[in-house]
Image: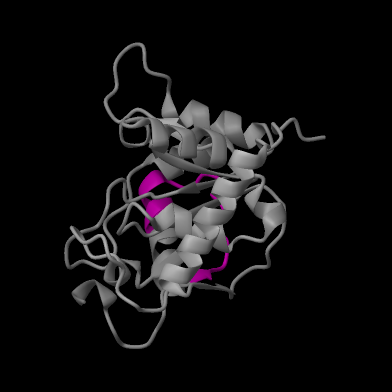
Amino acid sequence: MSDFPPAASGFLVDATTTALILAARVATGVRAEWQGCDPTTHRRIYYANHVSHGDFVLLWSVLPPALRRVTRPVAAADYWRATRMRRYIAEEVFRAVLIERTRTEETPDPIALMADALSGGASLILFPEGTRNTGDERLLPFKSGIYRLAEKRPEIECVPVWIDNLNRVLPKGEIVPVPLLCTVTFGAPVKLGEGEEKQAFLDRARAALLATAPTNGENHKDG
């Protein structure tokens, strides 16, 4: 039986959750496409391309309610704790796993935090590029975190998720969304193979994410 903590409740949290979902959907017209797997409540690591601070909000918003209740984004603690509002949203609404990007001897091990969340029954949303991709390359090389997490929890499916068009809807430095449609495409899961080396797994997971991207001949990073 899962010991995942129940979602926070209360009028304010419920109202904030509804407002965020509506805002994400109205601003982007987002639709989810489950192409490589079905939406289930099995524990998963949803890993996605990263072009905007709104990425995990958009991915989280398209999950069915039963999945959304047990799915926690992994996010930068320094950004989401910078203001009271961000902290409230991250901790009370998303129940995010907040990671310190500047490590000291006192900061918790981020892999251990994520593994503990999985052990507690949660699914995770993470971005293996490690930073927002603001360049022309469609997908940056992956950092090693997803490999180290898969080593600790090899039974967990890693589901590639391509978020398309959000960088065009919310260009860097703009606050008014451009009216374009976004898609969130869920691809075929990958798992760490027995004895699979780090770079081989990172390359395979990255290729699976690129294979999930729309094949319409356009590179939306050039927008």
Image position of 42 with respect to 23: above or below: above
Q: Is residue 100 left or right of residue 38?
A: left
Quarter of the image where one finds residue 62: bottom right
User: Which residue sits at x=46%, y=54%?
Assistant: 57
User: Which residue sits at x=67%, y=53%?
Assistant: 67
Quarter of the image where one finds residue 3: top right
Q: Can you name the residue that lies furthest to the right here?
A: 1
Q: Position of residue 85 (x, y in %)?
A: 40, 36
Image position of 86 with respect to 208: above or below: above
Q: Nearer the viewer, residue 50 or 85?
A: 85
Q: Position of residue 70 (x, y in %)?
A: 66, 45
Q: Position of residue 76 (x, y in %)?
A: 35, 36
Image position of 222 with respect to 82: above or below: below
State the count of labels.
0
Residue 158 in sight: no
User: Which residue sits at x=23%, y=65%?
Assistant: 171
Residue 169 in sight: yes
Magenta-span inclusion, residue 182 = no
Q: How is the image coloured?
A: one colour
Image position of 215 with respect to 183: above or below: below
Q: Position of residue 150 (x, y in %)?
A: 52, 42
Q: Nearer the viewer, residue 12 or 95?
A: 12
**Residues drawn in magenta:** 184-203
- Looking at the rendered image, the quarter that the C terminus falls into is bottom left
Q: Nearer the viewer, residue 214 or 22?
A: 22
